[in-house]
Structure formats: structure tokens, C-alpha cells
Image (tube, rainbow, N blue to C red):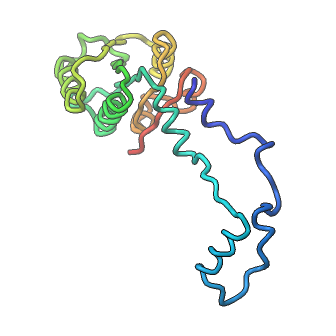
Amino acid sequence: MAFASSLLPAPVSRVRAGTAPELAAFPPARKGVSLATARRRGSRHGVRAEVNESGSALAVDALSQVKHVLLPVTDRNPYLSEGTRQAAATTASLAKKYGANITVVVIDDKPKDSFPEHDTQMSSIRWHLSEGGFTEFGLMERLGEDRKPTAIIGEVADELELDLVVLSMEAIHSKHVDGNLLAEFIPCPVLLLPL
């Protein structure tokens, strides 16, 4: 939950309207004033610049607190769809950079027996994560349950107290995951990757 709280807007008390007092010392700009002259004036009037934390710095700080990442696999492609491969690579990269653990959950409404290429898909998942430097990760299978993948992802994220879910937009476009229900069922931030 630290991720979500760090992305909140700045409090109103920190936002000021009007001219900054440091700039009030300068007369209105005149044509022909060089940048060097303006810099010299600034140093005479005690103008200083402050570096504010940008939104990207806040996001990086929030990601550094991620310690457990979920990679849901909802497609039936035994070699993984392009979106799932991208999500696997992103998950491995984030986990490696921030020292996080990975849990993969394979979700399908059909039982394992009805999917003859199941072992190929498991090998493909292992291969893609090992390419990112991960040979050890948690693996869960939620097969044959007559439930929506979004609800299963939310349940797993809640049970394991995950910090981040990495999901491709492809899962939403293909109607495997209901994008409208993500905020309702997923108790942690979701990183949606574009196609």
C-alpha cells in the first residue's frame, strides 16, 4: 500500500498561487537582456532554485518498497502470448532491480486434463523468468475453477499480501481479465503494460 500513498497529490497547503517572492525582485523582462545578465541579477538578489521531487522520483521510491510481485498468466498459448512474455520480462526486471520475490499464478477456467500443452506452458514460464535472472519463484495453478480471473488475481494478491501485480493490457483486451473490476478486487497496485 506504500506505492499508492506515495502517488497522492501534494497537499493544498504546499501549493501557492501568485508570484514567487524571489521573482518579485526582478523588473519586467526587457528586450535585449541576455541570459548572462539575468543570471548575474539573480545572484545579486539572492534568488535560489530548489529541486522538487518529481512524480517519477516518487514512483521510483515507491517501487523500491515492492518486495513481492505477482505475474498472472491467463492465456492458453503454450509458448505465452506477446503480452504475457512482456509482463514476465518486466516482472523479472523489477524484481531483480528491487530485490523482490515473484509469484506466478496460472489461471484457466478449464482443468489441467483438458489442456494437453500445460507442461509446455509451464516450461515456457520457467524459461522466460530464467532469461530475466530468476530460477526460483512461486508457482500457483488455479485451473478448472468456474470463477473470473480478476477475482482469482485479487484473492491471490490478498492472501499473499503482494505489493504489485504486473499484467499486460492484452489480458484485458482479450477479455480474460475485466479491467473494470481490477480496482475492486486487486488490493495492491497493478502495473498495466501496453501492447
Left or right? Give the position of 51 relative to 129: right
In this figure, what is the number of numbered marks? 0
Describe residue 16's horizontal placement relative to residue 139 as left or right: right
Q: Residue at x 76, y 67 (%)?
A: 23
At x 70%, y 42%, the residue is 10
Viewer-side residue, 168 vs 48: 48
Give the image location of residue 32, x and y in percent.
65, 90
Q: Is residue 72 visible?
A: no
Q: Is residue 41 above or below residue 161?
A: below
Residue at horizontal 66 percent and vertical 68 percent from the top? 43
Placement of 62 over or under 51, stated as above or below: above
169, 193: nearer the viewer = 193
Pick the quarter of the image with the N terminus.
top right
Location of residue 68 by image quarter: top left
Q: Using residue 195 as the reference point, say whether residue 55 is left or right of it.
A: right
- Where is residue 9 shown, x and y percent of the image? 68, 41
Displayed quadrant of residue 24: bottom right
Quadrant of the snapshot with the C terminus: top left
Please say whether residue 42 is visible from this viewpoint.
yes
Q: Is residue 107 above or below residue 26?
A: above
Name the residue located 25 percent from the left edge and 17 percent from the top edge: 136
Relative to 48, say whether 144 is above or below: above
Q: Residue furthest bottom?
A: 32
- Where residue 25 sits in the image (x, y, percent)? 79, 70
Residue 151 location (% of width, % of height)? 51, 18
In-front residue for pair 108/191: 191
